[in-house]
């Protein structure tokens, strides 16, 4: 089925949120980073300004800035409605989530989108935004140090299924030495049932896999990331 922009939920986070979700140290920001499913996040724009080397990939980058913005605006109405109906499912504490209210959530996501859209023409020319989709990436083996997935893998566990997750994470590990995935919850806030089968399979393949607590929690209980690396560290 051809990729349709109506089927995705582009909703972008900022650099400070990426830093917390993935516990990115200054040394991590000096590595070659691949953001998988970065959508309208401003991580690439902001990290590039401070000297980082980031490539973001997402199927929505095949669409025009105008189409992406329109889809984010539609998403905003849907998401804010859902959030207001389920306030207790989220952490409204700036120390944990950086967000104290739905109004602030909206303002943050819109600012991230604007920063992303402002950066897109220059970033596309520089090859920092790639219209591509997991699980097939047009990238060479081992061309990145760190591949990140924020709010894509595990979040859409029910829609994407186990086989997709195996293939997508296998592909991320083909192109990067290390993979980090956040959150380990699915939409609605339940723990993803795919996390344990994925951990067992990766360990049986010889990868070092750890569930690590992070200093970020917006979906209640969503304060863990999965870190996967080759055991020999190569
Ligand atoms: C909820 S957004 C998260 C955006 C960003 N990572 C963040 O956390 O701010 C999920 C993104 O996954 C992207 N996506 C959907 N299918 C994908 C695929 N097969 N491979 C990579 N990204 C995909 C969507 O286009 C969307 O931008």
Image (cartoon, helix red, strand yellow):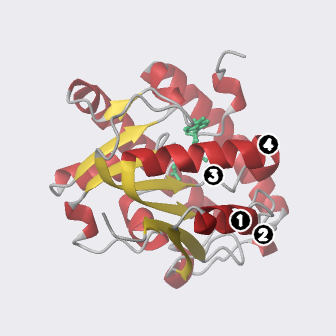
Q: Look at the picture and state if 26 lies above or below 178.
A: below
Most foreground residue, 154 or 172: 172
Instruction: Tell me the quadrant of the picture where the N terminus can be found.
Output: top right
- Furthest-left residue in view? 51
State which mark lies toward you, 1 or 3: 1
Does the closest atom of ligand 1 sit within 8 Å of the Cβ of label 2? no
- Where disc 4 sits, the SS reads helix
* Mark 3 or mark 2: whose residue is earlier in sequence: 3
Left or right of 165: which side holds 141? left
Which residue: 62% across, 66% down? 204
Residue 130, x across and y down, in percent: 38, 29
The residue under label 3 is: 153
Q: Are marks 1 and 4 in contact (CB under 8 Å)?
A: no
Q: Is residue 14 left or right of residue 189?
A: left
- Name which residue lies at 28% across and 67% down: 28
| Image-quadrant location for residue 177 | bottom left
The residue where tag 2 is placed is 191
Marks 1 and 3, how far apart at CA: 10 Å
Tell which residue pokes out farthest to the top in this image: 2
Q: Secondary structure at mark 1?
A: helix
Image quadrant of ligand 1 equals top right
The mark found on residue 52 in the picture is none
Q: Which mark is residue 159?
A: 4
How many other residues sit within 10 Å of disc 1, few (<14), some (14-19) or many (≥20)? some
Image quadrant of residue 140?
A: top left
Marks 1 and 4, Cα distance to the nearest angstrom? 15 Å
Query: In screen coordinates, is 22 left or right of 49?
Result: right
The residue wearing badge 1 is: 195
């Amino acid at each position: 089925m051809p990729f349709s922009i109506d089927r995705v939920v582009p909703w972008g986070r900022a650099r400070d949120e990426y830093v917390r979700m993935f516990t990115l140290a200054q040394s991590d920001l000096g590595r070659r980073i691949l953001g998988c499913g970065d959508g309208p996040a401003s991580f690439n724009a902001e990290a590039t300004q401070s000297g980082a080397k980031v490539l973001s990939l997402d199927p929505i980058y095949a669409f025009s800035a105008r189409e992406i913005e329109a889809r984010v605006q539609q998403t905003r109405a849907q998401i804010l409605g859902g959030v207001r109906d389920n306030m207790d499912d989220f952490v409204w504490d700036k120390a944990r989530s950086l967000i104290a209210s739905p109004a602030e959530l909206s303002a943050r996501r819109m600012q991230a989108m604007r920063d992303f859209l402002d950066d897109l023409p220059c970033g596309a020319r520089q090859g920092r935004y790639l219209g591509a989709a997991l699980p097939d990436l047009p990238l060479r083996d081992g061309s990145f140090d760190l591949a990140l997935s924020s709010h894509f893998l595990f979040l859409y566990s029910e829609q994407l299924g186990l086989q997709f997750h195996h293939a997508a994470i296998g592909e991320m590990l083909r192109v990067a030495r290390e993979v980090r995935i956040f959150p380990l919850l699915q939409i609605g806030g339940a723990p993803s049932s795919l996390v344990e089968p994925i951990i067992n399979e990766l360990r049986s393949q010889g990868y070092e896999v750890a569930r690590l607590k992070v200093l970020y929690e917006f979906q209640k209980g969503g304060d863990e990331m999965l870190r996967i690396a080759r055991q020999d560290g190569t």
